[in-house]
Image (cartoon, coloured by chain):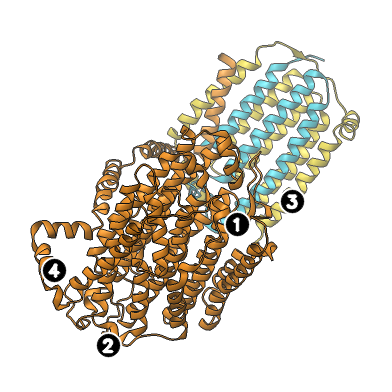
Amino acid sequence: MLEWIGLLPAFPLAGFLALVLTRGKLPRRIAGVIGVGSVGLSFALAAAITVEFLGSDALSHTQVLWTWMSVGNFTPGFSFYLDGLTVVMLLIISGVGFLIHLYSTGFMADDPGFARFFSYMNLFVASMLVLVLADNLVLLYLGWEGVGLCSYLLIGFWYDNPANGYAARKAFVVTRVGDTSMAIGLFLLFQQLGTLNIQEILTLAPQQWSEGSGMVVAASALLLGGAVGKSAQLPLQTWLPDAMAGPTPISALIHAATMVTAGVYLIARTHVLFELAPSVQILVAFVGLATLLMAGFTALTQRDIKRILAYSTVSQIGYMFLALGVGAWSAAIFHLMTHAFFKALLFLAAGTVILSLHHEHDIFRMGGMRKKLPVAFWSFVIGSAALTALPFTSGFYSKDAILLAALEQPQYGTLLWLGGVLGAFLTAIYSFRLVFVAFFGDDHTQDAHAHHSDDHGHDDHHHGPVKEITGFVMAAPLVILGILSLVGGFITVPVDSVFGVHEEHHASTLVHGFMIAVPIFGVLISYLLYSGAPQGRVLQQWLKSMRESAFGGGLTRFWFSGWGMDALYNLLFVKPFVALAQLNRKDLIDQFYGLLVELARISNRAIVLTQTGYLRWYAISLIGGLVLVIGIGVWA
Amino acid sequence: MPSIPYEHGLILAAILFVCGLIGVLTRRNIVFILMSLEIMLNACGLAFVVGSARWGHADGQIMFLMILTLAAAEVAVGLGLIIQMYRRFHTVDISVLSEMKG
Amino acid sequence: MILLFYLAGAVALIATISVIVSTNVVHALVYLIISLLAVAVIFFVLGAPFAAMLEAIVYAGAIMVLFLFVMMMLNLGQATEDEEKAWLRPQLWVGPGLLILVLLVQLVNVLVTQQVDVVPVEVGVRELSVLLFGPWLLAVELASMLLLAGLIAAYHLAKK
């Protein structure tokens, strides 16, 4: 079975080709079967491979398909590498991806771009599978860029609306910054180590470089740049909230199963390099910490259901980076897995809400949906509970592991731990704020369109009666993901052999108790603030007065805009670039070539004058030339 | 046999040649232009024959034969063109055919 | 003999000048024939009787008759002759004349550098034929191809 590993990305790729080459002419049913079935086959194969791999004693398996190219001593192969980490990633990508595909057949049922949608989704999954299976960094980069391309295609899926195209370009350009950094990192690694095979790099690096030497710091910092771009961490996080322009299942796919986890995977995969560069590793932790806090505060102020979830993703990836930064590799991968479950669940449930409310995104225009949308409601409750890390949900175990690992960090342990706990507190408030506002209280769906921001593709706001749109294909993924979100914490990720350590974190009962109490406290505060409960009137009054005060209002706006990062980048990069472009509007270099053109034009005009069309004129010029030549020959 | 100055023959050929050239340059009637071309070709032939006599060798005369052939072919094609031109434009004025001007 | 050379040369020159200043095509053709015949005489004087005969038969005979036939086909009348008169203005001759004078001076300048007298040696048909069908055979074949091409082209071009 292991030798069939090459088929894993081949199935979705074949699905992509089939859907693309038929140019959307296939009936929806067949297109749906191809789109979902190809990923389903991949999942089945991945499951079978996992069973066989874990059953055997082998620690890894390498399958060389063919040599990709051969230039000098640079011969990256099209070869796949399988170990515990890969297995986990494969199951997450194909499994969660399959559920999202299945859900999409319901969600996208009426969309004219049905087949196109599934072709992009299949290519997305195929690219991501190549990324995690690659045994060398060049092949990994191929998958990496494929994921970037697909994210561009999918975010701009409803391309009729220019705003969506803008969001897609933004995602593409911002991640490109990170990709460039990563590419330079690859060049550096190849130049220094003479190979890009990941396992060889991991073996060679400790032999060649001493801990903290300049080269390894540079290489790992450059790789971190790539990971930061792809995983939407500070300072390249601005693209992810705007990526909500695409259809909701895409958000689920980007956030849960594929793209954003690529950065976490990359760092985990090359963890040896980061262990050799402690300064970069601690930087990873602080990037994660800063991102998770920043995104948490931002999520508190958002109104758009998908943007809240987007910022929560940024924040959760921040936790994973925090874990990577303190060397808790398996905790990071564990959180990656549980996050895939509950974030996919939340996004798909949000999709159901949005579709049922005729493309309404604003949570303050929902309210009281508890009874009308029971499936979505329970999905949200379970997903938010896991996100908040309430005890015995999957998120509890993974976040617990991360925070305990952070506490054990020798230098900044307490600081990182406190930040993480504060983040958990924020997570509890914003995620249950969403639940309480959207599903409790009064129904606001019929409110006038006072402040509607139209940032999605569909404009058909005929506000009919709210009826939950559900069916087997849409409900089944929610149920499965809901169960996984609850019990996913009991799964053990088989990555100890990959990282060479078995992580076990111990802490005093006091610390444990505190970490359990904080999210519950957060949920309580959220309940008092946002559910309209009479007990919380004092707090609600305080929040209202805060929001109306100058300082509070300003802070709200600041957080709402994502800490002004977009404005900052606009000021730092876009404005100067535009100014330079305006300065060079006439294109100074082009002027030189314009001169050549002008010269050619002038000489053309001059020479055209000689073309009179009269035979005599031509004969005379001929004779004139003859006289000249003979004259030179005779007298000169 | 009294001798003839070699360069006198060549000078005659040159004068005949430039006469033909003047004809080509000044006439507008295409028939006269063709005739002037014939004069020039004939002058060249004369130069070859003079050369042949100067060196006492027959190769110059062979070149004259080649020129004769060339002239025959050229006149045939040229006259065909004149007929065609007269049919289309009802004139023998070469200046009418100046459509190729830039 | 030497007198005959200069006489024939003078006739050829005068006839040629008459060609290029004539306004009537048929008159010009007759002058041209005279010029060609005079050149044929010069050939004879220079000891090239075969070339002289070909000049008379092919040039003055066949080619000029071809000209004459075409002129009769075109049937250019008095109108053309008047046109020619209008075109032959003296100022038209100034530019080309000067240019060509320079050319003539140059040519003469080149030609009079060596003073060699020619003692004509008659080259008969026999010697010529030996050369033609010996070393010059390829040129003869090419000339025949040229004539064939001229024939086909003339047929095609003159077709209605």
Q: Which element type, helix, strand or loop, lies under badge 4?
A: helix
Q: Which mark is residue A383?
A: none
Q: Chain C's shade in the image?
A: yellow
Which amino acid is tagged 1? Answer: Asp
* Residue receiving disc 1: A83
Q: Which element type, helix, strand or loop, lies under badge 1?
A: loop
Q: Which element type, helix, strand or loop, lies under badge 2?
A: loop
**The numbered mark 3 sits on a residue in which chain?**
C
Q: Chain B's shade in the image?
A: cyan
Q: Residues within 10 Å of mark 2 (few under 14, many from 20)?
A: few
* Residue receiving disc 4: A539
Q: Chain A's shade in the image?
A: orange
- Say whether marks 1 and 2 touch (CB < 8 Å): no
Q: Position of residue A490 (x, y in %)?
A: 48, 68
Q: Residues within 10 Å of mark 4 (few under 14, many from 20)?
A: some
* Residue receiving disc 2: A464
Task: Check chain identity for marks 2 and 3: say if they share one.
Answer: no
* Residue receiving disc 3: C151
